[in-house]
Image (cartoon, coloured by chain):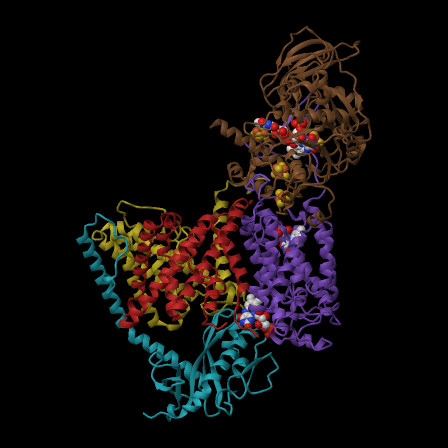
Chain colours: A yellow, B red, C cyan, D brown, E purple
Amino acid sequence: MATLPNRQEQVTLDTFLRGIWEENPVFVMLLGMCPVLAVTNSTINAIAMGLATLFVLVASGALVSLLRKLIPKQVRIATYIIIIATFVTMVDYVIQAISLDLYNALGAFIQLIVVNCVILGRAEAYASKQRVGPAVVNALGMGTGFTIALLCLGTVRELLGNGTILGIQVFSSNFEPWVVMVLPPGGFFVLGAWLLLFEWLKQRKAEPAGAAEGATVHES
Amino acid sequence: MSPDSLGFIFLNAAVINNFVLALFLGICPFLGVSAKKETAWNMGLATMFVMLVSSLCAYGINLLLVRFDIQYLRLISYIAVIASAVQLVEMAMKKFSPALFRALGIFLPLITTNCAILGLALFQTFREYDFLQSLAFSSGAGVGFTLALMLMAGLRERLALARVPSVSQGAAMSLMLAGLLSLAFMGFAGLGGSHA
Amino acid sequence: MAGAQPQAPSQPRTPGGAMLRTLGGIAMLSGLLVVLVYHWTRPIIAENKRIAIEKAIFQVVPGAVTRKNFVLGPEGLFPGDAGKAKGDQVYAAYDRDGRLKGVALEAAATGYQDVIRILYGYDPGCQCVTGIRVLKMAETPGLGDKIARDPDFLANFEALDGRVNAAGDGLEHAIVTVKHGTKSQPWQIDAISGATISSKAVGRMIDASGQRMFPLILRYRDGFERRD
Amino acid sequence: MGFLNLFRRHKTFPHGIHPDDHKEQTAGLPIRRLPFAPKMYVPLAQHRGAPAKPLVHPGQEVVRGEPIAEAGGFVSVPMHAPVTGVVRALDRLVPSAQGPKTPAIVIETYAADTQRVGWEMPRDIDQMTPQELVQAVQEAGMVGLGGAAFPSHVKLLPPEGRSIGTVVVNGCECEPYLTCDHRVMLEQTDRLIRGIRMVMKATGAGRAIIGVEDNKLDAVGVIREKLKDQPGIDVEAVETKYPQGAEKMLITSLLGKEVPSGGIPADIGVAVYNVGTLAQLGDLVPRGRGLIERVVTVSGPGVARPGNYLVPIGTPLGFLMQQVGSSSEANELIMGGPMMGMAVASLEVPVTKGVSGVVVFEPDAPDLQRRPIHPCIKCGECLNACPIHLNPSLLGELAAAREYRVMEESYHLNDCFECGCCSYVCPSNIPLTQYFRIAKSINRETRTAA
Amino acid sequence: MGVPLFARGCGSEKTMKTKHRPVEIRTSPHVKKAISVEQIMRNVVYALLPVCAWSVWQFGISALALILVTLVSCLATESFFCWMSRRDNTVRDFSVVITGLLLALTLPPGFPLWMAAVAGFIAVGLGKSLFGGLGFNVMNPALVGRAFVQAAFPVAITTWTPSFLPGRFSEFIPSTLALPFMSPVETREWALERAVDGFTGATPLALHKFEQITTSTSDLLLGTVAGSAGETAALLIFVCGLYLIARRMMDWRICAGVFAGVVLVSLPLWLFDPGHYPSPWFMLLSGGLMLGAMFMATDMVASPVTSLGIWIYGGVIGALTVVIRLFGGLTEGVMYAILLANALSPLIASVTQPRVYGVGRGKG
Ligand SMILES: Cc1cc2nc3c(=O)[nH]c(=O)nc-3n(C[C@H](O)[C@H](O)[C@H](O)COP(=O)(O)O)c2cc1C
Ligand SMILES: Cc1cc2nc3c(=O)[nH]c(=O)nc-3n(C[C@H](O)[C@H](O)[C@H](O)COP(=O)(O)O)c2cc1C
Ligand SMILES: Cc1cc2nc3c(=O)[nH]c(=O)nc-3n(C[C@H](O)[C@H](O)[C@H](O)COP(=O)(O)O)c2cc1C
Ligand SMILES: Cc1cc2nc3c(=O)[nH]c(=O)nc-3n(C[C@H](O)[C@H](O)[C@H](O)CO)c2cc1C
Ligand code: SF4
Ligand code: SF4
Ligand code: SF4
Ligand code: SF4
Ligand code: FES
């Protein structure tokens, strides 16, 4: 984790925003990559997955924070996992109740939220040390950051791979979809491309204007 | 090969629908532990081993859950039982084979809570595999995971000496490499099916 | 309950009582939450599932409005769901008047990428397949996945010849997929151009299922008739 | 191409390269004596081991052949006056081929002198014990003339627990341009055989094999003729291939054995001597003389009168160049052969005991080494060339990444003997050998620093 | 002739002043073999030109346009990324020309030009520049490009046109000219109208796999069959490859390894059931095997450097090709076999490191 706040935090806008940009779980911390890659072949899946994760993050964050004084150190991880698994099971049933199609599209990945490192990581590093307020706000931020990352992938992949966004035709009907984008390699490529883009922007900003220092690592 | 045959299940889990490269399970260890061949190999072995253990556990628990009609506790009990089973095995290994423990030990706690393991347990349950099929499935998944990890480690070790542009160093390149591997693995599509 | 499961990290020097109390408490709480949600969503999910399966059945057996579940095997026909008796799940579908319109059954085979699973309808009256619906597949979008929606391809299954042979132990003509544009017999399936493998998988699975099941369906035909 | 090996006629070792040999310029020219330079510079450290200690003082007159410095230890040899003249200085710093300046005795030549050798103590080698022979060899100031300039007497005394069974005589001369050993084998065959006999006696070896590359079959013929009544000595032609003359390769070619990594030939009971070394020994030891001159091939596109010259040790290169008609100051001079030799930056560098040749390239000759350097394209040519079976491609990438320790610990860097085959073949023009040299020296430095 | 030394504090050449002039200190060896990377690459281009010419003769201006478009796309991408990463432009080393040519030769004639341009961009961008350019790519760039468009546009890349159509020099195959990002038109009807004899629109491998029709050997040798632009004339490709082998610019062991792999797997199957399994001969001559074995497996950058490794690498490609063709979902497996072997090659290389002289075997 990038920050390990050990003292009690005030709820500020930053508590929320941090998870979206500076400590974005996907783009910066590279956590919870499996669902990010697996379910983002359409925007709707990305949204559903993002919201489900957001819910589990917030609910488990709140509960962990509430119980933080009661949980003995030795069994905290086991306790967190049980708490998370509980909320995931609930989400799983709720999604089944809402739409079977959506449930089938997301497959096992809803249940796999249990092992999503973002959630356990937040519980361990933040919620277990903070009051409920900051814990919930921080979880909201992280969840939103996660959802945004999912959307970044989901929209690109659906748009290129299917010519649609949220199932709505965007390009002319004659558009030739890039099927690879909704196939497994496309997931890796799109996420890789986003990371390349961010890295490029970062390096361009960091570089003093007009410096002609080459990107060459070494000559050989 | 028939879709239910053990050989096909094995092949399918190992290469055709490789856990990492096609199903996106276990991406975190795949990206995290693939920089060196030795660690990748040990991680692969450890994962293979945990997969077998958890597959057996999941098979057993599922029988119980179905018997008592409490499937809604599946997720909670899978994760709890797999974690404890791995812990027990780890303790036994430490006691009886310290050498093996030194090689695999540090990876075991990492593996317990990753998608590949839980995913394996859930998939075999959804697909209603019987005992032998579960065994074939988990060993296939383990072999496939190790294969992907080793290929990735080989490529990354090679690129460690390359003149990689500064933007593409790091996670972005690992993902692109994974994408290329995934692209190459598409060549296994339909292997073992009868197409005549 | 989950709390009864042995818990993972059991370090020494633990204030045992407090630990058990907390774990027990948490387990109770989580059990409670899960059971609550489960009971709340169960009827909705069951209803969703029923709607989904009926939609599929009524699609592959045109004209049907009600259904009944059976298990059909070499040992006979039993009402109910698979798992309780030996055999394959078969859904009998009836029209408004309660007359048997056909039966729906599942079939599966490996396609281009992974297993394709379909539900298809069979009319014992005309001894023909009346429709298919893909339940699960991982075929290439834009290519193999046309088997689910390409109207020309689906038209193959509106009246696909599935006559049982004289001996009553198989099909008169094996159901086969032929190259696009070369269908000449009612028991042939015209492949989708560019997705021959997926098309052939559909042909293969119906043939395999049909060779086994169609004679049985005809033998137990009377058993399907609605008596309630 | 590998399958061509099926048709090869003579023994050889795996891998290696076939550079153009350019020997036709000088191979047919008999050895000629070079005039004496007006001033001679005799460096005190001309060989591996401890430098010699001067015995003379400035202003002293010396006679050609007289010892002017004594051995500085066991792994060291004395020096003898190359000319009759007067000592002008004892520790003048002169440039050396290796770069740093080293102290040398300067002798001003008596121009009027006939330059006869005026100092000898004849011995009857048949009556000498092996110990006496070893001492005689050291007193002769002999070092390996094959290039390494390792004191020859040291190799006569194998380390504790080893004994020499076979003497391998190295007449390969695999470097392009050089023909001095070729001429020695043709012109000084009797001395060579005498030298071999002596070394066999000193080491107790029962057998000697002379290995000669098959581009010098005339030498093989001459030697074989003379060996008719010499039991225990054989001559064998080996394939013309660089670096056939490296002792490890020659041993493998002739005996089918490998010198263990990090070991010396004595570990497998072999001692290797260059033909020039033995021919000199065969001449000097019976007469009780010291090593004062040697045969040097002067060749290359920048030389008007190429040939094999008998050059007094200590002759400055500038004088040598004048004599052979290499006028342009801009020429590129290489001491030794083009594969292993050193580029010299100064014409003041004197000829030393280890210099077997001087190759002169014209400055503006189209130069392949100036090509741009590309990254390694993994063509594998270097692996197929490396006689030690290293992986220069990987070593090169490791060197570029400055992983010097890894190179040494996991990829046998120290087994590389800098033959240059990998650099020679590399289409990407990567200076591999040069990288490895640097890597080794940095490892050495860090080790001594630690 | 100076060697730029990279070690501590000496990024530039070391010079030493003498009386007359500064002299660069060089170290041995002072001579070099005359062969250079540019020369090798240029010769591969020469060897590919006859294959390109044949492809244009066979498929007309569509093939010509395809070759030009991939070439331009690859060159432009290479220049662009060199510029982006502020390196010297490396197009002059000719390796990217090979990538462009080979990419075109592996695409079907009639492949929409805009897709070909995408393939070229991906080939060089994703396949090569991302990793640092020449020498550092982990997979064959041309095949990365092709695999990408195969996964992206599976229909277009399995649409074949007949060879030697009458109007091929005056008229483009309609799908060639599809507008960027738009679907190409159906060419089946168009092809049927023009084809002299019954055109099936299937390659020999597809014919064999789906219809058990075996194409005659002479057709395979001469290339009068459907297929990718440059893969059909096995004989011509073989001869052009031999030229490179003779000039020692290509490793004959890789091609030999591939052929051996193919024969070792397909011969026993064929002997076991000649009716069902095709002969090794057919396997060698059909599809892209000849092009792949001679020009694509031999790309040294992504193959192992060790001798034993090279044989294993070749054998793996041959064996995988047959396995994918006979037991997989695809009709053709050369491309994937090469890509998979590329991915495997660091592992192959690391287990086949040569035994160092004087190490291990000890004395003798
Ligand atoms: C990336 C890719 C994906 C493919 N996906 C499918 C598929 O899902 N279903 C299928 O039947 N064929 C698929 N194919 C095509 C088959 O390999 C084969 O070429 C085709 O089924 C042959 O049919 P045809 O003879 O009608 O052209 C795919 C090909 C490629 C290159
Ligand atoms: C440190 C060192 C010790 C050596 N010790 C011996 C020795 O004891 N006996 C021997 O026969 N040669 C010895 N040699 C000589 C080598 O075997 C070899 O002949 C010499 O290094 C020159 O060989 P080259 O020109 O192939 O490099 C030694 C060489 C070195 C550098
Ligand atoms: C790459 C290489 C090439 C060599 N080539 C020759 C050669 O052609 N002839 C030769 O006598 N020594 C050659 N040597 C030196 C021998 O290894 C060895 O030192 C020498 O034969 C020992 O004899 P000496 O001590 O009498 O010089 C070469 C050494 C190396 C490292
Ligand atoms: C014999 C030979 C074969 C080659 N084959 C290919 C090829 O298949 N694909 C490719 O992109 N480049 C090929 N190249 C060119 C070059 O090696 C390639 O662009 C590098 O992979 C770029 O780093 C080949 C070069 C040679 C000498
Ligand atoms: S290269 Fe060395 S060993 Fe070979 S002939 Fe020349 S000096 Fe002798
Ligand atoms: S210089 Fe070293 S690495 Fe290169 S070929 Fe010679 S021994 Fe091998
Ligand atoms: S010869 Fe040069 S380019 Fe070829 S593998 Fe060796 S180092 Fe690399
Ligand atoms: S002297 Fe300079 S160039 Fe030579 S090794 Fe040392 S630092 Fe490198
Ligand atoms: S999200 Fe899958 S292993 Fe971490």
Please name whichever residue, B22 or E60, is drawn nearer the observer in this view of the structure. Answer: B22
Q: Residue visible at 51% across and 84% down?
A: C157
Where residue E34 sits, quadrant-wise, is top right
Q: Position of residue E294 (x, y in %)?
A: 67, 57
Q: Is residue D331 visible?
A: yes
On the rendered structure, is B2 left or right of D264?
left
Quadrant for the C terminus of chain B, please: bottom right
Number of callouts: 0
Q: Where B126 falls versus D91 (above or below)?
A: below
Q: Position of residue E252 (x, y in %)?
A: 68, 53
* Ligand 6 location (quadrant): top right
Q: Position of residue C130 (x, y in %)?
A: 48, 86
On the rendered structure, is B191 left or right of D251?
left
On the rendered structure, is D66 left or right of C82?
right
Q: Residue furthest left?
A: C17
Q: Position of residue D320 (x, y in %)?
A: 76, 21
Please name whichever residue, A210 or E238, is drawn nearer the observer in this view of the structure. Answer: E238
Q: Is residue A210 visible?
A: no
Q: Where D231 falls versus E154 (above or below)?
A: above
Q: Where E136 falls versus C81 (above or below)?
A: above
